[in-house]
Image (tube, rainbow, N blue to C red):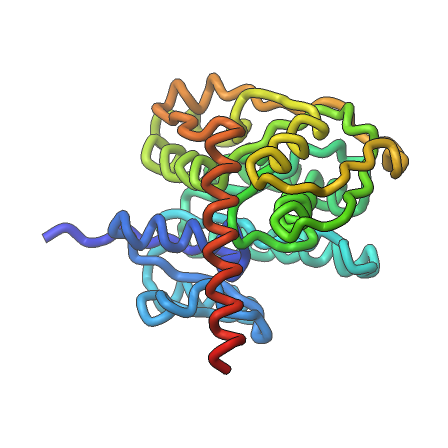
Amino acid sequence: MTTARTLLITGATGFLGSHLVRKFLNDGWDVAILKRPASNLNRIADVLDRLHVFDVDSLNEPFVTLGHVDVVIHTATNYGQYGEPTSSIFEANTAFPLRLLEALTRHGTGAVINTDTVLDPMLNAYALSKHQFKQWGQQFARDGRCRFVNLRLEHMYGAGDDPTKFTTHVIRACLDNAPELRLTLGEQKRDFIHVDDAVDAYAVVIDRLLELAPGFNELDVGSGRAVTIREFVETVRCLTDATTQLEFGALPYRLNEPMFSQANTTPLTTLGWTNHYDLAAGLAKTIKSERSLAARINKNKESA
C-alpha cells in the first residue's frame, strides 16, 4: 500500500489556492492548509472535511502533527488594494513566509513552491515585498536548507475570481451590460493565463521536481503570448454580446505602468506542461461559468 504524499498550501481560501486544493486532492495527495483565524472558508467549504486545517499563528503545528510534509505551496499574499499600511504588506508577503521557511526547514521539508509576481519590484509595496521574499528563498536554497522553486505568475483569470481584479471586473461589467467601461488606452501588453492552466503548471513542477537543478529554480507561468489590454477587453465584449461602451483613453496609465509582460514557457513545456486554453477559449469557459454562477445566485435570492 502506497502512502499518500503530503502537501501544505498557504492561501488555500483564495482563488488560486482553492483550485490547487481541489487539484491535489483529486490527484491523491494528503492536503493540509494554513489559514488565518478569520479566513472565509466558502471557496473550500465542500472539501473542508478532507483537509488538515491549521492556523498561521502556529507555524510548527502542521509539521509536528503530520509528521512529514513533502512540499509546501505558498500562494498567500496581500496585494495592498485596500490601503493597508506598508508594514502590513511586508508582514504578509515577506515576514510571514520567511517564518514559514524557518519552520519547514527545522522539520525537514525539502521543497517550497513559491508564487511570485512578474511586476517590477519598484512598482509598489506589494511587488517589492514579494521580491524580498524571493531573495530570502534564494538565500535558503544557496545554504542548502531547502529546494526553492519560484513561479513567476502572469495575469491569471477564471470564473469566481476576486471582483476587484481587472479581468473579473471587465467580464462582469460586460455580462451586466454596463453602460460604459472607463479604461486606459489599452496599449499595454499582458500575458493572460486561465487558472486551470496555471494549476496544471504547479502540478507538473511538483511531479517533475527532481528533474530541476537542486537549490533555487525560477520558472514563468503564463500562456506565452502577450496581447494588448484593448484586445482582451474587446474579446470579452464580443463573447458576451455586450453593448457596453468601451471608453479607451478615459483613464491615465498608472505611474511606472509596465507596458509589456510575457512568459517564457519553454522551461515549463520542457517539463511536460501544455497550455490548453488560448485567450478566446479561456474567456469563453470563464464567461459560461460566470453566467451559471450569476444564475445560481439569482435563483437563491428568489427562493430566500
User: In the figure, residue 260 lies in which quadrant?
Assistant: top right
| Left or right, residue 279 beside residue 27 | right
Give me the residue at 76% from left, 54% from top: 80
| Left or right, residue 80 beside residue 141 | right
Front-most of residues 115 and 58: 115
Q: Residue 196: x, y in percent?
A: 43, 40
Front-most of residues 139 and 92: 92
Q: Residue 79: x, y in percent?
A: 71, 51
Give me the residue at 72% from left, 28% from top: 230
| Left or right, residue 50 beside residue 202 | left
Front-most of residues 228 and 7: 228
Outermost residue, left direction? 1
Give me the residue at 88% from left, 37% from top: 250
- Residue 122 visible from this viewpoint: yes
Residue 275 vs 239, above or below: the answer is above
Q: Residue 36: x, y in percent?
A: 57, 69
Outermost residue, bottom direction? 304
Give me the residue at 51% from left, 76% from top: 302
Residue 240 vs 269, above or below: the answer is below
User: In the figure, residue 115 lies in which quadrant?
Assistant: top right
Residue 15 vs 231, above or below: the answer is below
- Residue 152 visible from this viewpoint: no
Q: Residue 6: x, y in percent?
A: 32, 54
Numbered disc total: 0
